[in-house]
Amino acid sequence: MLAMNYRGPYRVRADHKPDPVIEHPGDAIVRVTRTCICGSDLHLYHGMVPDTRVGHTFGHEFIGVVEDVGSDVQTLKPGDKVLVPFNLFCGSCFFCQHELYGNCHNTNPEATAVGGIYGYSHTAGGYDGGQAEYVRVPMADVGPMVIPDDIHDDDAVLLTDVTPTGYQAAEMGDIHEGDTVVIFGAGPIGLLAAKSSWLMGAGRVIVVDELEYRLEFAKRWAQCEVVNFREVNDMAEHIKKMTDWMGADVCIDCVGGDAAGSIAQTLTGRLMKAQAGSSTVLHWAINSVRKGGNVSIVGVYGPTFNMVPMGNVLNKGLTIRANQASVKRHLPRLIEHIREGRLSPKDIITHRIPLEEVSDAYHIFSSKLDECIKTVLIPPRANEVRAVKASVLH
Amino acid sequence: METSKQVNPHSHQHDHIGHAHEHQNDYPMVPQRPTREQLSHIQGWGADLDHKNRPGIPMERTPPRFIHAHEGKLPQQPETVEILTSTERPGITPIFGTKQPPKGLSGMMRRLAFRWAENDMRHWLILLAADRVNVVEGIGEDLANGKVPNVLAEMGIKAEWEHNRSGLVKKAVIAGAVLGTAVYLMRRRDR
């Protein structure tokens, strides 16, 4: 099969690899019909996540058609069209039993802090991801969801990560009516967090980024205020000026360790890797939020450590919440929002690129070329089912 | 909508340094909030205002919803390749990935890294070093398979040419100048 193949920092290509096989009675094999490049894939692409092995196939946002199932699988059958949450989870462990599906204890032997994630290095379990023609989907009865007929494929693929993660980012901010919410990052997650903040009754939503085209999109699509951090003297001071000197009620980090905006952080976090990525946004969030406010973190950092102003967390009495999104618990409500027209995730897709051109797709997304916001990769065999269905109809 | 250059007049944005001359009356006792009418143009505003509508609240809830949970103990996936396991757990998990097992020098380094807990910095630093060694091994592997890796294509040079031509030319000129200077200096030293 054709699959994305990691060769080293900033180097990926499309290569032929052996097809995946059933390795556990709970597995399914899914033929991928849509897969996205996520902002967090860029942390892998930039070589920031330890134990990212050469030959690995990235991709944790994908939908597809079930091709084969293991002997234990009861709820799926070949031909089912499914969306697959980015987290691999068993449904049985203590954490899954508490709906913390992003924190499963049974799917990642290599690390305990993070559950299994498709195509996200061996630190997240060593599973090849969905930027391929086929993918092995363990615990097929638990994770995947059959895509309802009225949900568009492009919305479905964005329900595997970006939409639930953006929603959970806002949810973890514990937004109350009229709250001022500052979102750092106008990428896909930040945009969905902005939309979700309105759903939760925010009074003001302010999105911060450095790219004008993304800020323009945020202003137009998410109807929010925007700040270009390159145009302000100091981020925390500016947010305080915008909020009657109080600070925001909620600050959300939708960037993670690849953040720009501070030479010292870029040097130590991104170039020297002396900390687990640049903590610029954590710094801004902690210092921009009001006393007693909430900081929500969904931006991805490495597993070592980051320099953050913990003294201010204490002195300001902040609540910090963070997690990988528990995708499955959010799906029913998010599908309702899509049906009611409150959310339209597919609007953020700017690029559709064949899987064969994955090297260019990564470069465009990583370097923010061509006003890229969200890239969907289309594997060569994506349309086979439609062809079959058409032949049946005739 | 407001932009960074159009700050709310209530916010007292000034270009001065410090605020010693301001007095406490400048600070509202209660933060100003827009009314529901002012927000009525926002599609879906407040649909999840009630925390009961938010599926992640409370954070932990049991029994779990929305899943078809496996009854009894999960079957153990057979170990067909070498899997490194964290020292912070008692053994292997019932399910795991089997791709890219450790091999070569990078594999030896990864095995060494897994002697230490995730809590220990050595674990991660050795893994990061192993990743870099693995990149060199990957080039060797390509060459051994008769394939010369097209590094520029892998880095997306086609996209750079299409969408950032001037940037690419600039990078090429800088790289050429650095390389040329290095060659010149080395030749001068040889003389």
Image (tube, grey):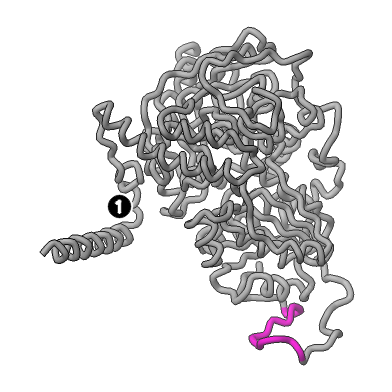
Disc 1 chain ID: B
Q: Position of residue B139 (x, y in %)?
A: 32, 36
Task: Specify few, some or many for label 1: CA neighbours under 10 Å numbering under 14, 14-19, or 20 or more.
Answer: few
**Magenta-colored segment: predominant secondary structure:** loop
Q: Which residue is mark 1?
A: B161
Q: Quadrant of residue A277?
A: bottom right
Residue at (85, 40) in percent of width and height: B58
| Amino acid at the residue labelled 1 | Trp
State whether residue B140 appears in this view: yes
Depicted A129 relative to depicted A392: above or below: below
Depicted A176 relative to depicted A82: above or below: below
Residue at (13, 61) in percent of width and height: B190
Q: Which residues are magenta?
A: B9-20
Q: Is residue B16 magenta?
A: yes
Q: Position of residue A377 (x, y in %)?
A: 46, 36
Q: Quadrant of residue B183?
A: bottom left
Q: Is residue B31 magenta?
A: no
Pick out the residue farthest to the top: A71
Depicted A127 relative to depicted A290: above or below: above
Left or right: where does residue A323 sit relative to residue B4?
right
Q: Secondary structure at mark 1?
A: helix
Q: Quadrant of the N terminus of chain A?
A: top left
Q: Quadrant of residue B70?
A: top right
Total marks in image: 1
Depicted A137 relative to depicted B18: above or below: above
Residue at (54, 18) in percent of width and height: A29
**A145 or B121: nearer the eye?**
B121
